[in-house]
Amino acid sequence: MRKIAFVSAVALGLAMIGAVAQAADASSYPIAGLTPNHRPLGAPAITTVKKDAAWYERALKGIDAPYPASVEKTVKDQGNWYSPFTLPGMSGKYDIRHWHG
């Protein structure tokens, strides 16, 4: 009885692997993580960074001028990727830039 259950489980697992592989081949989207050192062909790429006055105002909210050199460099080098520097953080006594006030 245990042998039949084991063989059934193995057969089911192999069937699932085959279905996943077939679905991956049929998809036109790249699968992340298979080759992390290579950018997939056809993957979208950021070519420009739009930093208008509103972006700078938000990024520098709660920081008094003259801005420290480290802050100026961070803002200058910031691209279109996630950064906690330009978003509200914790509230209460930890809100030193007054994002939540």
Image: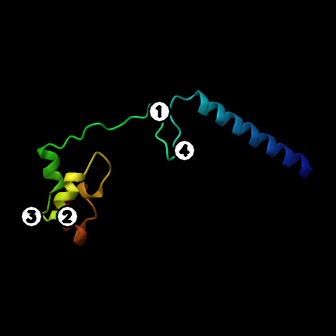
Going from the N terminus, do you reach mark 2 or mark 3 first? 3
Going from the N terminus, do you reach mark 3 or mark 1 first? 1
43 relative to 66 in the view: left or right: right
Residue 38 position, x and y percent, is 49, 42
Q: Are marks 1 and 2 in contact (CB under 8 Å)?
A: no
Going from the N terminus, do you reach mark 4 or mark 2 first? 4
Structural crowding at the residue carrying mark 1, measured as other residues with C-alpha within 10 Å and reported as few (<14), some (14–19) or many (≥20) = few
- Which residue is the site of mark 4? 35
Identity, as a three-letter code, of the amino acid under mark 3:
Asp
Q: CA distance from mark 3 to mark 1?
A: 44 Å
Residue 71 position, x and y percent, is 18, 61
Q: CA distance from mark 1 to mark 2?
A: 36 Å
Going from the N terminus, do you reach mark 1 or mark 2 first? 1
Going from the N terminus, do you reach mark 4 or mark 1 first? 4
12 relative to 63 in the view: left or right: right
- Which residue is the site of mark 3? 64
Mark 4 element type: loop
- Which residue is the site of mark 2? 70
Closer to us: mark 3 or mark 1?
A: 1
Closer to us: mark 2 or mark 3?
A: 2
Q: Residue at x 19, y 64 (%)?
A: 70
Identity, as a three-letter code, of the amino acid under mark 1:
Leu
Q: Are marks 3 and 1 in contact (CB under 8 Å)?
A: no
Residue 89 position, x and y percent, is 27, 61
Q: CA distance from mark 4 to mark 2?
A: 35 Å
Mark 2 element type: helix
Q: Are marks 4 and 2 in contact (CB under 8 Å)?
A: no
- Which residue is the site of mark 1? 41
Q: Nearer the viewer, residue 14 or 3?
A: 14
